[in-house]
Amino acid sequence: MSLVNHAGSALFRSERQEYRIIYALSFPLFLAVALISRILPSRLRPIAIERGGYFQVIGDARAAAHSVLPYAFMR
């Protein structure tokens, strides 16, 4: 006897796939905001940034995406 609910597993897989699609579509927007945040003076920045190089910009965009996108799945 299986303890795994296959209907729930399919629902979880579907939501995970939707999250990945929304993430892939919105990541360029978050990346653009992170890049603009590097250019603007500190008082006009839309998000707080830390010192770092190219990969830090991607990390900032990834962190912003992962902190905002879960709200799309709230019921």
Image: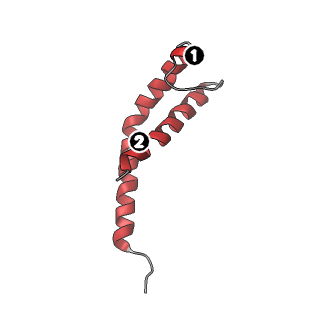
As helix, strand or loop, the secondary structure at mark 2 comes to helix
Contact? badges 1 and 2 (CB < 8 Å): no
- How far across and how far down the image is residue 32, in percent? 45, 24
Nearer-the-camera pick, 50 or 20 = 50
Residue 3 as seen in the image, left or right of residue 50: left
74 to 3, vertically: above or below = above
Three-letter amino acid code of the residue under disc 2: Tyr
| Mark 2 closeness class: few <14, some 14–19, many ≥20 residues within 10 Å | some
Residue 6 as seen in the image, left or right of residue 34: left
2 to 64, vertically: above or below = below
33 to 20, vertically: above or below = above
- How far across and how far down the image is residue 26, in percent? 39, 35
Residue, disc 2: 23
Disc nearer the start of the sequence (1/2): 2
Tell me, for residue 42, which label it has, or none. Answer: 1
Looking at this rendering, what residue extends furthest in the bottom direction?
A: 1
As helix, strand or loop, the secondary structure at mark 1 comes to helix
**Distance from the alpha carbon under mark 1 to that under mark 2:** 27 Å
Nearer-the-camera pick, 49 or 54 = 49
Identify the residue at horizontal 34%, vertical 58% (top origin): 14
Nearer-the-camera pick, 34 or 45 = 45
Nearer-the-camera pick, 68 or 15 = 68
Identify the residue at horizontal 43%, vertical 87% (top origin): 1
Three-letter amino acid code of the residue under disc 1: Ser
